[in-house]
Amino acid sequence: MGFKHGSARFVGVLGAAVLSVALSGIVPAAADQAPGDGKDAVERVPFSHIPADIRQKMHDQIPLKKAASKISWAVEKTGQGGFAGVVLQPDSVQLWWKGKLSAAVSKAVGDARGTAPVEVKPARYSQAELKAAAAGLLAAMKKDPAYPISQVSGSLTGDGLVLTTKDKGKALAAQARTAVGVPVSYVDGGVAGLNGRYNDSAPYYAGGAILNDDNHALCTAGWPVTDGRGNSYVLTAGHCGRVGGGWHNGSWTTAGTGLWIGWAVQENVGHDLLLIDAPVKARMWDGSSAGDFTKGVVGWDWAYANEWVCQSGAASGAVCGIQNTTNFTYGGWYRDAYGNTEYYSDLVVARRADGGQASLDGDSGGPVFSLSGDYDVVAKGTITAHSGSTLYYQDFGTAWRDFGVTTIVN
């Protein structure tokens, strides 16, 4: 049986204390507390959450990293000279160097060879030379956020520069105006240093970082929805913004610029739901800050007691192992992004089974989902609050009731 609107079957009413949502929320002190971490009941295997083949690869690199560390410290302490880079290979460490090794680095290489095989490879350019060649491009890029080159990198084997761009033609023209003097290659990409969910662009996906124009408060895009009349929206948490407020993507503050998303047009304060008028697509950002990827959205479903769900907030990335409890909040007090005290009701209570943090500040509004096969997700709700391992979210069925919206699907 699903969580029903106002059903008396679900117990655990929120306490009356006013809570600061902190843009991802905390829950009432009177709410059910998480159980112990299960150490006495569950036998744990170190790093068992990492696939066995990845664990083995990490283990195999231990001696290589010890050898590389000796070399790197010598370079750090005595100066780079002809240093281009240290590269780990499957069975050896490569030191790329232009010219003759300094005495200190040569000694470090000898010491390192007692730990793992080390090859000294001739570099065409040192890192110092590559950085000097890149200086003009970097200066031009810093002056203009719309510059066609979004990142300049140097090859750690000393081959030349690697420029990140979305428009190779414009990047070639820009590079031609700047004296570089070393070989240049190009890779396709967006703003340097930003993962996909922090640099999302239209059409917008669930799970992307979004910023409130009023105060730059970080929240997360919830589900891509439609009202069935040709209008599309981002569904997110009401406490993140206000009707009439504008929104940009997550690169707005991190890179000093950003892309426009849209205006907030509808809100149900009591249910902590907000609609932002925006172009959207039936995809959700998955993964973590270490690397993002996307999944398809195939629809929505009710939330069920004891159901296992995941969330994909901009701050925490995807977190699974969360189970709905048999409690369903009837109401409680929170503070929104502007410091206003608001009363929210009909929230689902869920808990991360291993006792870990269920979400982080900045995840508010983000998608709560279940799985459909290996590559798609089903919308279950949007994040309102958290306290340790406990997650509070508004189920999608309530948004459907309030706004008449459904998920856009592939």
Image: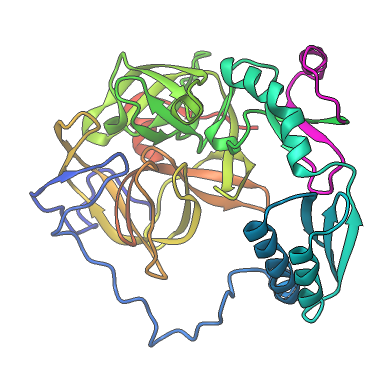
Expressed as whole percent of the image width and height from the top left, the position of residue 198 reads 53, 34
Q: Is residue 186 left or right of residue 150?
A: right
Residue 239 vertical placement versus 140 (above, below) = below
Residue at x 73% of width, y 75% of height: 56
Q: In which quarter of the image is the C terminus?
A: top right
**In this orientation, which residue lies closer to the viewer: 215 or 79?**
79
Q: Quadrant of the N terminus?
A: bottom left
Residue at x 47% of width, y 55% of height: 309
Residue 230 vertical placement versus 134 (above, below) = above
Q: Is residue 159 magenta?
A: yes
Q: Is residue 374 magenta?
A: no
Q: In which quarter of the image is residue 174?
A: top right
Residue 225 visible (yes or no) = no
| The furthest residue to the left | 16
Residue 225 vertical placement versus 320 (above, below) = above
Q: Quadrant of residue 137?
A: top right
Residue at x 87% of width, y 56% of height: 100
Expressed as whole percent of the image width and height from the top left, the position of residue 162 reads 79, 34
**In this orientation, which residue lies closer to the viewer: 326 or 74?**
74
Residue at x 22% of width, y 45% of height: 6
Q: Which range is magenta?
A: 154-182
Q: Is residue 123 left or right of residue 404?
A: right
Expressed as whole percent of the image width and height from the top left, the position of residue 331 reads 17, 45
Q: In which quarter of the image is residue 242?
A: top left
